[in-house]
Amino acid sequence: MEAQDKPPIITVDGPGGVGKGTVSRILAARLGWHLLDSGALYRLVGLSALKRGIALDDEAAVAGLAIRLDAEFTGNSGDNTVIMLDHVDVSDEIRTEGVGNAASRVAVLPAVRQALLERQRRFRLPPGLVADGRDMGTVVFPDARLKVFLRASREERAARRYKQLKDKGIDVSLDALLREIEERDLRDSSRRVAPMRPAEGAVIIDTTHMGIDEVVDGILRAWKERVA
């Protein structure tokens, strides 16, 4: 049970492509709460390493970047959030496939996860927080009152990403996206520290055949039941 003297938290975990980012933004807006996009922090670390030519498996060097990470989130914690790295707007750059893969690789490093742990916990501010990630309910906020784990078939997740990239005019292979998703799922679920998995007592929602509004409404109903 979450400590009553702390701001409430809803954690939304799951693999890439399940819709957790969009769902979390809408939830935060509907509740009037803050939003933590933990994946953005790992993407920033990965991007920082790429820009500096640091090997993504050099744990000490990458952890040093995470500790000193000069990052800033400005805006409304929604679609208009501006993400700065070293005083440069990287809001679009961190959403590329290359940076996503770099984030997945640095996220397996225990020292990097430890370096970002307290930084993530500092997002817990009144009136509440929606935390989006892969270990929000299991590691970062284990006392959250409501923990949600979203999942969807790999084929559906690849199709969603394919459409997103095509809509942006980016030429991409659906088969290549599916392979990348499979590789990333394996890394995230098998890493030694904080592997991706549903938290104990989590509400598990399969979004394969669900719209975003359906998922959001389901989570809000679960939240109302928890606080009733």
Image: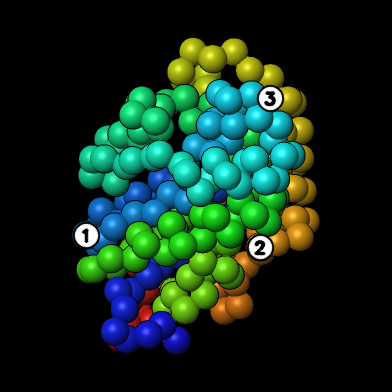
Q: CA distance from mark 1 to mark 3?
A: 37 Å
Measuring from the top left, give residue 20's x and y in whole percent.
48, 51
Describe the element under mark 3 as helix, strand or loop: helix
Q: Earlier in the sequence, mark 1 or mark 3?
A: 1
Q: Nearer the viewer, mark 1 or mark 3?
A: 1
Measuring from the top left, give residue 105's x and y in whole percent.
69, 41
Q: Nearer the viewer, residue 155 or 37?
A: 37
Image height check: is 27 above or below 167?
below
Residue 76 placement: quadrant:
top left
Is any part of residue 154 visible from this angle?
no
Residue assigned mark 1: 32
Amino acid beneath label 3: Leu
Q: Earlier in the sequence, mark 1 or mark 2?
A: 1
Is any part of residue 117 visible from this angle?
yes
Q: Nearer the viewer, mark 1 or mark 2?
A: 2
Is residue 202 rendered to the left or right of residue 132? Answer: right
Image height check: is 167 above or below 16?
above
Q: CA distance from mark 2 to mark 3?
A: 29 Å
Measuring from the top left, give residue 126's x and y in whole percent.
23, 68
Instruction: Give the crowd class for mark 1: few <14, some 14-19, many >=20 residues within 10 Å.
Output: some
Residue assigned mark 2: 194
